[in-house]
Image (cartoon, rainbow, N blue to C red):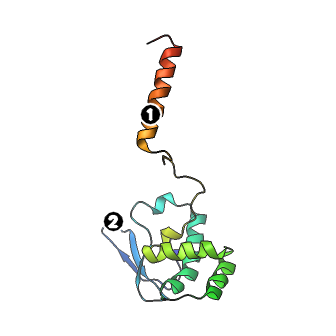
Amino acid sequence: MTSLLPAPAVFCFNEYSFPKFFLNSYSGRETTLAWKGELDQIPEADWKLAARRERIIAPLADRDHVTQSEIEQAGEALRLGPAMVFRLLARYRRKRCTSVLVPETRGRKCGSRVLNPSLEKIIETAIKDESMQSCGVA
């Protein structure tokens, strides 16, 4: 797993021998790899991509101002549009963790709800009532 990380890296291990963070070679700041339990859920190809993204995004995240041309250069290097580079940059600035740069699956998250819970309850009740009436139970 350590071969996937950008070098040079200084590792710190907790009591579970889990690599907790490494020193960002661009800024000297500690950067979290992933929170406990995340690493085994991330496919190796996605982890490699996240590490590659971090090598490009981390130097930009350490600066207060990033120019449009720098965003475009990062986008070309990552084969992403400027909007996605800005999103990755914002995520990485909020939580300096390699795992935030792992590609996300498209679409809604599993279990997410679109409707207001009270509206969903009304619909659920109506469906239940309709099914009971069609079965002759009322």
Q: Is residue 81 visible?
A: yes
From the image, tell me which residue sits under label 1: 122
Choose between 9 and 54: the one closer to the eye.
54
Quarter occupied by residue 75: bottom right
Pinpoint residue 79: horizontal percent, then vertical percent.
69, 74
Q: Secondary structure at mark 1?
A: helix
Q: Locate residue 54 relative to residue 76 in the image: left or right.
A: left
Q: Amino acid at mark 1?
A: Ile
Please, which residue is most extreme toward the left here? 15
Whichever of labels 2 and 1 marks the residue nearer the N terminus, that label is 2
Pinpoint residue 108: horizontal percent, then vertical percent.
55, 52
Q: Secondary structure at mark 2?
A: loop
From the image, tell me which residue sits under label 2: 16
Pinpoint residue 81: horizontal percent, then vertical percent.
67, 74
Q: Locate residue 136 relative to residue 78 in the image: left or right.
A: left
Choose between 71 and 14: the one closer to the eye.
71
Mark 2 to mark 1 CA distance (whole Å): 48 Å
Q: How many marks on residues?
A: 2
Q: Are marks 2 and 1 in contact (CB under 8 Å)?
A: no
Q: Is residue 96 visible?
A: no
Quarter occupied by residue 102: bottom right
Q: Amino acid at mark 2?
A: Tyr
